[in-house]
C-alpha cells in the first residue's frame, strides 16, 4: 500500500488557498468602493468575469487536498479536474505575459506548471487500496 500523496495534498492546498485569498481580496476591495461608480467602470467587466472561476478553482483545489488527504475515492478525479484547471490558468497567464513582453514574470510561471504536473503524476501513479486494507494494516 502506498501512502498519501503528500506533495499533491500540499500543492493543491497551497495553490487553492492562494487563489481563493486573491479572488476574495479583489472582491472585498471592490465591494468596499462600490459606491464610487468610476471605480467599478475603471475595473471593467473582465475582472468580474475572472473572479468567479478563480474562486471556484481555488475552492476546488482545497477540496481536492482534503479528499486526497482522506484518501477518498473521488480524490483522484478531483485532482485531475483541479490540476487541469491550474494548468489552463498557468498557460493562459504565461501566454499573456509573453504577449506583453514580460519574460521574467513568464519564466516564473514554470514553477506552478511543474508543481502541478508533479502533483498529477504523484496522484496518477498511486494504486487504489481497498477500505479493508487501510483499516487492518499490512497483511502478515
Image: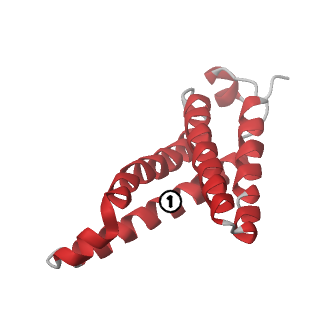
Report the side of 15 relative to 101 (left or right): left
The image quadrant that residue 68 belongs to is: top right
Report the side of 2 relative to 12 (left or right): right
Determine if residue 72 is in view.
no
Decide: is 107 above or below 118: below
Assign a secondary structure to mark 1.
helix
The residue sitting at 54% across, 28% down in the picture is: 74
Decide: is 116 above or below 93: above
- Image quadrant where one finds the C terminus: top right
Looking at the image, how many numbered discs can be counted on the residues? Answer: 1
Report the side of 95 relative to 40 (left or right): right
The image quadrant that residue 10 belongs to is: bottom right
Counting from the top left corner in percent of width and height, residue 27 is at 32, 66
Decide: is 83 above or below 11: above
Label 1 environment density (alpha carbons within 10 Å; few <14, some 14–19, many ≥20): many
Counting from the top left corner in percent of width and height, residue 45 is at 31, 58
* Image colouring: secondary structure
The residue sitting at 41% across, 62% down in the picture is: 23
Counting from the top left corner in percent of width and height, residue 115 is at 74, 51
- Image quadrant where one finds the N terminus: top right
The residue sitting at 53% across, 55% down in the picture is: 16
The residue sitting at 22% across, 77% down in the picture is: 38
User: Label 1: which residue?
Assistant: 19
Determine if residue 6 is in view.
yes
Counting from the top left corner in percent of width and height, residue 131 is at 62, 23
Q: Residue furthest right?
A: 140
Amino acid at each position: 500500500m502506498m501512502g498519501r500523496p503528500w506533495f499533491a495534498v500540499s500543492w493543491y492546498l497551497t495553490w487553492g488557498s492562494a487563489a481563493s485569498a486573491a479572488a476574495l481580496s479583489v472582491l472585498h476591495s471592490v465591494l468596499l468602493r462600490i459606491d464610487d461608480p468610476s471605480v467599478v467602470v475603471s475595473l471593467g467587466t473582465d475582472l468580474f468575469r475572472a473572479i468567479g472561476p478563480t474562486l471556484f478553482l481555488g475552492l476546488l483545489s482545497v477540496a481536492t487536498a482534503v479528499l486526497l488527504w482522506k484518501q477518498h475515492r473521488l480524490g483522484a478525479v478531483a485532482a485531475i479536474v483541479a490540476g487541469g484547471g491550474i494548468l489552463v490558468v498557468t498557460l493562459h497567464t504565461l501566454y499573456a505575459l509573453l504577449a506583453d513582453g514580460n519574460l521574467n514574470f513568464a519564466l516564473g510561471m514554470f514553477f506552478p506548471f511543474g508543481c502541478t504536473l508533479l502533483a498529477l503524476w504523484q496522484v496518477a501513479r498511486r494504486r487504489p487500496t481497498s477500505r479493508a486494507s487501510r483499516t487492518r494494516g499490512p497483511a502478515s
